[in-house]
Amino acid sequence: MGNHSHYHHLKHKWLKKNKELHEHIVLKHKDISRSHRLKQHLIGGLMLASTPFIAATPAAASTPPIPVPTPVQSSSISRQEVAELLKEKLPPNVRPLTPSEEEDITSTLSKNLRIKVLPELHGIRLNRSYGLIGQEQHLPRFVGDSISQHFDSSDDATIYASYGMTPGRGAWGYFANSKAELTPEDNLREKYYIAVQTFLAPGWNEHVSEYKDFFKYRKMLLVNPENGKAIICDIADAGPGESTGKHLGGSPEVMKYLERVDGAQKGPVLYFFIDDSNATIPLGPLTL
């Protein structure tokens, strides 16, 4: 009985407060709208935002709580665990993967890295998804770009300047029309770029224009299966040629992170498309 009386006391108090607030809002916002229906909606929203919360008793609850979206969680798997999982699934030699091998590996990576990883996207795929990556130079970001002005810090210049810059542009041209128009996104696209053999993709010769649009700055996941390091890159160039014995190339920053900078400056990597239709996955290393 005490609870019932307490409920009615709170109800009476709230209704009184509601009436006072309604009159205050109407007087303060006389010109809020000439539409009676819009005025009702706006006043209701203002009252809801202004009314202090009063916890209802179970008997008074009439609507279920609104579910709160669960934030995307970062990967909890270690690099060593990634390397161990891949070791069990990859062939002993570097060769094109079979469809069943690709399905098994992409399923494992998607589950553990919590990123949708795909060997084929929108009906388009590369000639392979497991190959040897080689060292690439920096790409000019705009007309007149040079090594002397290419880096944001002296530390980066010390580490990466010696790799030099290509004499020509990437496959899609310059990243920006001028230095003044260069954006942070343009910088990241060059910093974490890869070159892939777009010209060997099945259907390339029949759909050159369509495939060029698809591959331009397309994001991919690269994984070094030997140490489990993973990084999100974008396609900014085409190559290398088949005669090199390499299947893709990485910027100096990409190669450094993957620890593929050895005597031969090449080594095996997995590379797959990622489903980033909402553009929420940033370029750069994945923290594992």
Image: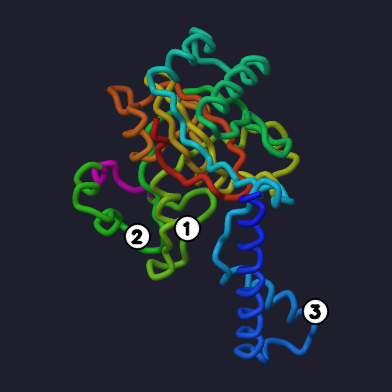
- Residue 251 is a magenta residue: no
Per the rendering, the mark at residue 145 is: 2
Q: Which residue is mark 1?
A: 174
* Residue 188 percent location from the top left of the image: 41, 51
Does 12 sit above or below residue 172? Answer: below
Between the residue at mark 3 and the residue at mark 2, the CA separation in whole angstroms equals 59 Å
Does 63 sit above or below residue 101? Answer: below
Per the rendering, the mark at residue 37 is: 3
Of the numbered discs 3 and 2, the one sitting upstream in the chain is: 3
Q: Which residues are magenta?
A: 160-166
- Is residue 68 found left or right of 137 in the rendered image? right
Please name whichever residue, 3 or 60, is drawn nearer the observer in this view of the structure. Answer: 3
Q: Which residue does the image show at 24% across and 57% down from the upper left?
A: 148
Displayed quadrant of residue 107: top right
Whether label 3 touches label 2, CB < 8 Å? no
Q: Which residue does the image show at 42% across and 43% down from the upper left?
A: 192
User: What amino acid is at disc 1?
Assistant: Tyr
**Nearest to viewer (mark 3 / mark 2):** 3
User: What amino acid is at disc 2?
Assistant: Asp
